[in-house]
Image (spheres, rainbow, N blue to C red):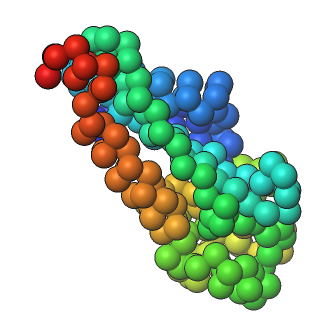
Amino acid sequence: MPEGLDTDRFGTFTGAVPRVGTMVEAARAKALAAIAATGLPVGPAREGAYGPHPVIPVLPRGRDLLLWHDARSGHEIIATLTDDAPACDRIGGAATEGAQAFLTRIGFPQTAVIVMGAGGAPVAKGVRDMASLARALRAAGADGAAPLRTDLRAHLNPRRVSMIGQLAEGFARRLARRCPAIVCRGVV
């Protein structure tokens, strides 16, 4: 990512900054911001959405999208991948002891957690150890019990890293292919 480019302005997983528009619109805005920041004619971007499954709402579902924007032609290549078993979960009002089953289920500490405070604002993000979790729960108030959720930022969620890797491999293969329309016209 170019230095100084703040992609959080396009939305955050905690909801502190709501995403404006669709996943494609947010990814496009990120790609255009990268082009503006670097001066390069092309910009890649990634966007993700995680929440309840649209058919079976008690199950989580994730979707990641990669977008490649070419400012010279205006062309875009978009690829998506859906994860029907993401590390995406939450628990309400947990104290350190009561959170153990949740933490085990999500694969803590490899998968980090976010401790939510009053009003739904995050008290701590990227929590990966019990001491930090206990401090964040105390800081959240409510007698050391607060809602917890998995941190869905890719670098703190190994399942998401794996899914993005799969998506990126397929995307790279797609970018490496020549367009059949150009090859048929004899342009190479």
Q: Residue 175 or 5: which is nearer the viewer? A: 175
> Where does the image place residue 45, in percent across and percent down from the top left?
41, 35
Left or right: 137 as drawn, with respect to 129: right
Task: Give the residue displayed 52% in from the left and 67% down from the top.
Answer: 159
> Where does the image place residue 74, in percent across and percent down from the top left?
37, 13
Asked if residue 88 shows in the view, the reply is yes
Left or right: 97 as drawn, with respect to 114: right
Asked if residue 6 shows in the view, the reply is no
Task: Give the residue displayed 70% in from the left and 56% down from the top.
Answer: 61
For the C terminus, give its image quadrant.
Answer: top left
For the N terminus, give its image quadrant.
Answer: top left
Quarter of the rendering containing residue 177: top left
> Where does the image place residue 162, in percent across and percent down from the top left?
45, 64
Q: Residue 61 or 152: which is nearer the viewer? A: 61
Q: How many marks?
A: 0
Question: Residue 72, relative to residue 3: is it above or below?
Answer: above
Task: Give the residue displayed 44% in from the left and 51% down from the top.
Answer: 167
Task: Give the residue displayed 41% in from the left and 23% down from the top.
Answer: 76
> Where does the image place residue 88, in percent across and percent down from the top left?
67, 63
Quarter of the rendering containing residue 85: bottom right
Question: Residue 91, relative to residue 123: is it above or below?
Answer: below
Quarter of the rendering containing residue 91: bottom right
Q: Residue 150 or 133: which is nearer the viewer? A: 150
